Image (cartoon, rainbow, N blue to C red):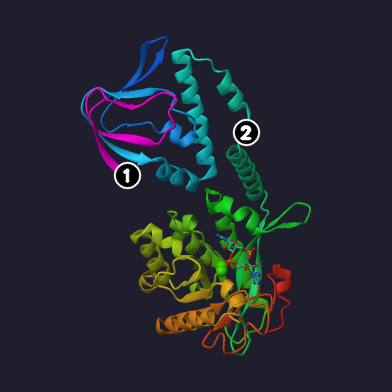
Amino acid sequence: MQQRAVFAANQLVFSEGDRGDFAYLIEKGQVLVFVVRDGTEIPIRVIGEGEVFGEMSLIDDEPRAASCRTLEECQFIRVSREHLQERIKAADPIVRLLVRVFLERLRSQTEIIVGEDAIHRAHKTGKITQDQKEALERIGLEHKIAEAIEADEFVPFFQPVYSLPDRKLRGSEALIRWRRSDGSYVSPLIFIEAMESSSLILDAGRAMLDKSMAALTLMQGMMKTDKPLFVSINVSGRQFMHEGFVANLEQLRKKHAVDAGQIKLEITERIMMEGERALEVLRECRRLGYGLAIDDFGTGFSSLQYLSKMPLTDIKIDRSFATQVQEDPKIAAVVKAIVAMARDLNLHITAEGMETEAQLAPKNFIGVDYAQGYLFSKPLPIEQFLKIPT
Ligand code: C2E
Ligand code: CA
Ligand code: CA
């Protein structure tokens, strides 16, 4: 909670050693940060309008390192510990590590200024917190990912997508795999989050587009189907919003001489957090003829407002529905409603994660155009995909 507070001149805001409860943004007035040593007040800093103070102990959970008093009548906005902690917890672990390191440095400076015994602090900085451990692991993983991109170790696997009810092969979804030099594969569950939260996804994403389109030309040339096959490619928000995404997409499409209509870009509704800019890129992709699929539908907010605004061609019903639809009539009703709505919006519907015939029982997914899942096939390397009977 943020709230305004007015303090008279010469009023103590907090004392050294207190547990931090609020951070303060100064709207009006000035405060003095000070410590008391041997009965003498030692001023540290004057802080004025537009500046923040008292945030340190909210972030690192240590007691206040100094006291603070108003020099004149002041008006503050107070930010509670819970509010700030929420933000910090939501932040990237590397940002959290940096904040922590920065704070420790700041605190040890305060100690130098006031000549306080720093043994306690040195002891504390010597041990690695869970947070720091996570951040260090993350930095290590990002480093390995960067090396693997350099060594061209990321490749797409392809999971076939079939039409319903006739079960004809219509296309595939490209899913990233990390092929280690020893021939083993690493699942994206291990690395995709680290990749997507840094710019690593840009290079890896480009390689996926390139290799998926190359594979599409092989599929086209070697597999006999009555309609051209499509390939669905996952595109992360960062990648999609990156300047030059569409130009790069077009360049690769021309290089491989494939039709935009054979490529579906899979995005999640999180993209809409980017506002109007996201809509512009989506429209541009549609104008060029690419398919646009909303992935994992039904897991996030699944805002109907977004659904009507986005220029989509496809919707993919999240695989969590596949497992629940048989047991829970309410889930079955939700699936039915999603399908009805998607039909009215003229969208192609894919049911993901189909593992058993029972899940696909006609009544569950009436009106669904495509199905995908282990029932048909796991994601396959291109050599194996090309051998699928058509
Ligand atoms: P997703 O886009 O929802 O992909 C479907 C995931 O479900 C894939 O996991 C697939 O292997 C798995 N799957 C397919 N059929 C079944 C089934 O019948 N049962 C079960 N239990 N799982 C099934 P995968 O390959 O591990 O990918 C995980 C996620 O990583 C993907 O979820 C997607 O969000 C992300 N991802 C994969 N490739 C890329 C990529 O090239 N770029 C980006 N940005 N994200 C990717
Ligand atoms: Ca997907
Ligand atoms: Ca999905």
Q: Is residue 228 visible?
A: no
Indicate the quadrant of ligand 2 in the picture.
bottom right
Residue of label 2 = 128
Q: Badge 1: how crowded within 10 Å, few (<14), some, or many (20+)?
A: few
Disc 2 is placed on an element classified as loop
**Would you say the beta carbon of the disc 1 residue lies within 8 angstroms of ligand 1?**
no
Q: Position of residue 316 (x, y in %)?
A: 52, 74
Q: Position of residue 191 (x, y in %)?
A: 62, 53
Residue 2 marker: 1
Picture layout, residue 106 above or below residue 232: above
Disc 1 is placed on an element classified as strand
Q: Position of residue 47 (x, y in %)?
A: 30, 25
The structure residue drawn at horizontal position 73% and vertical position 77%, both measured from the top left corner, is 387
Is residue 92 located in the magenta-colored stretch of the structure? Answer: no
Picture layout, residue 22 above or below residue 263: above
Q: Is residue 132 left or right of residue 243?
A: right
Camera-side residue of 349 and 218: 349
Q: Amino acid at mark 1?
A: Gln
Camera-side residue of 198 and 33: 33
Q: Is residue 272 left or right of residue 174?
A: left
Spatial CA span between label 2 and label 1 = 32 Å
Q: Which residues are magenta?
A: 1-30
Q: Amino acid at mark 2?
A: Ile
Quadrant for the C terminus, please. Answer: bottom right
Q: Badge 2: how crowded within 10 Å, few (<14), some, or many (20+)?
A: few
Is residue 9 located in the magenta-colored stretch of the structure? Answer: yes
Camera-side residue of 214 and 233: 233
